[in-house]
Amino acid sequence: MLEQYGVVYFGNDWFAENRTSSHHVAVRLAATMPVLYVDSPGMRAPNANGRDLRRAFRKFAEALRAPRKVDANLWHCTVPQLPFRRIPGVGLFNRLFSQWALRRAMRVLGARPRISWFVTPHPGFLAKRLGEAFCVYYCIDDYAAHPGVDVEVIAASDLALTGKADLVFVAPPALLAAKQALNPNTHFSPHGVDAKLFAQASDPATVLPPATRELTHPVVGYFGSIHAWIDVELIAWLARARPQWTFLLVGYAAIKVPELASLPNVLLAGAQPYASLPAWAKAFDVAIIPYRRNRQVENANPLKLREYLATGKPIVAVGNPEIARFAGVVRIAEGREDFLAGLDQAIASGPEQGAAERMAAVADQTWDHRVKNVLREVAASIAATEMTLADRRVSE
């Protein structure tokens, strides 16, 4: 049924350092129907730093191009917006310009009916304005809790899109009840994992990255971006408490981390290709999720949780409702001392103990399985909508 549709997909930056659920879902949707992936603008106004300026220029240049084919059934385009959303007239300009640009870009989907699919809320003003037959909101985060965003604008966008969408999926369990109160057609859909890819961390044939081959073990590892919600003070405290250990941090540092950079037993490896993460994780003796306790973390569904589990490595984490669901295979720490005790215990036991149980905990939670379930709900909801419209026409 869904093969007759095309999807206009509003996702995170296609070229972002991290591969998020936004990317994983889009690629798998394209296995069923053609997808136009639209880079959404950032939720915060750009800073005057080199990275943000390069990103702004890149997006502007891409906006002048026709959609580019990146896979057999997947196209990518950029429709930039003015970020100063509170200035009078900016909202109207963004809406009119985006509608014009997208109607041109959507030609790659042909004449088929369309589904609009939003992973971020701030382009939600376009929902039901693109001539689409159906609208999906796939909410993967508490966006208004992100640092540096215009909380009022993002929260309002999230509420409006939740109410307007024909179908809502929610990844963080802490957000489910509130979303269902706004839109009864809301379903829980936690993140998936590329289990086959991350199992390479346990494969003897996987080659370690050169930077890890001479590291002093045990190695405490982390992969993912280092943002404001990562407790870098906790990592520094742990590194000082165990100077004989190596702390290997793999990912782009979006914040300044001079304290970590100054420690001799901390290696900041920087951003690495997504497909190489299992090789880096192979060097870990234990993996960590060192979150700060705040609203964003409480409402998060951390993608790296399932990726760590799929590697088989032991995990010590700061807890939240989603991590608590895996308490049987994850050591959840309460405070610094407990976090350190968890690392001591994991290292004393060795990375092999419990590895099979950790991998089994996510073996049936692959992205393929998640998207299959999501598409089943979409097809059922579209069928129900069409039946309701047909009944209404008969009664008229």
Image (tube, rainbow, N blue to C red):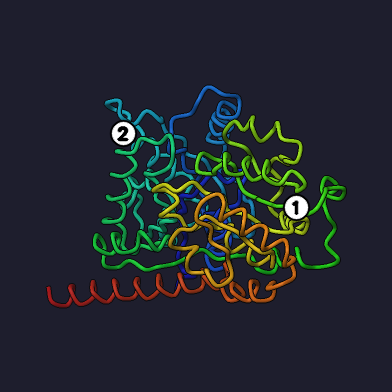
Q: Residue at x 43, y 44 (%)?
A: 102
| Front position in the image: 74 or 44 | 44
Residue 298 location, quadrant: bottom left
Q: Describe residue 155's horizontal placement relative to residue 251 as left or right.
A: left
Q: Residue at x 72, y 40 (%)?
A: 266
Kind of element beneath mark 1 = strand
Q: Residue furthest top?
A: 48
Label whose residue precedes the other's in the sequence (2 or 1)? 2
| Front position in the image: 141 or 16 | 141
Task: Examine the rendered structure and indicate whether residue 161 appears above or below residue 153.
Answer: below
Q: What residue does disc 2 label?
A: 91
Q: Amino acid at mark 1?
A: Val
Q: What residue does disc 1 label?
A: 219
| Dot label at residue 96 | none
User: Is the C terminus in the top left, top right, bottom left or bottom right quadrant?
Assistant: bottom left
Q: Position of residue 226 (x, y in %)?
A: 59, 41
Q: Amino acid at mark 2?
A: Gly
User: Is the N terminus in the top left, top right, bottom left or bottom right quadrant?
Assistant: bottom left
Q: Describe residue 160's horizontal placement relative to residue 273 as left or right.
A: left
Q: Position of residue 241 (x, y in %)?
A: 67, 44
Q: Describe residue 315's horizontal placement relative to residue 43 as left or right.
A: right
Q: Residue at x 62, y 48 (%)?
A: 224
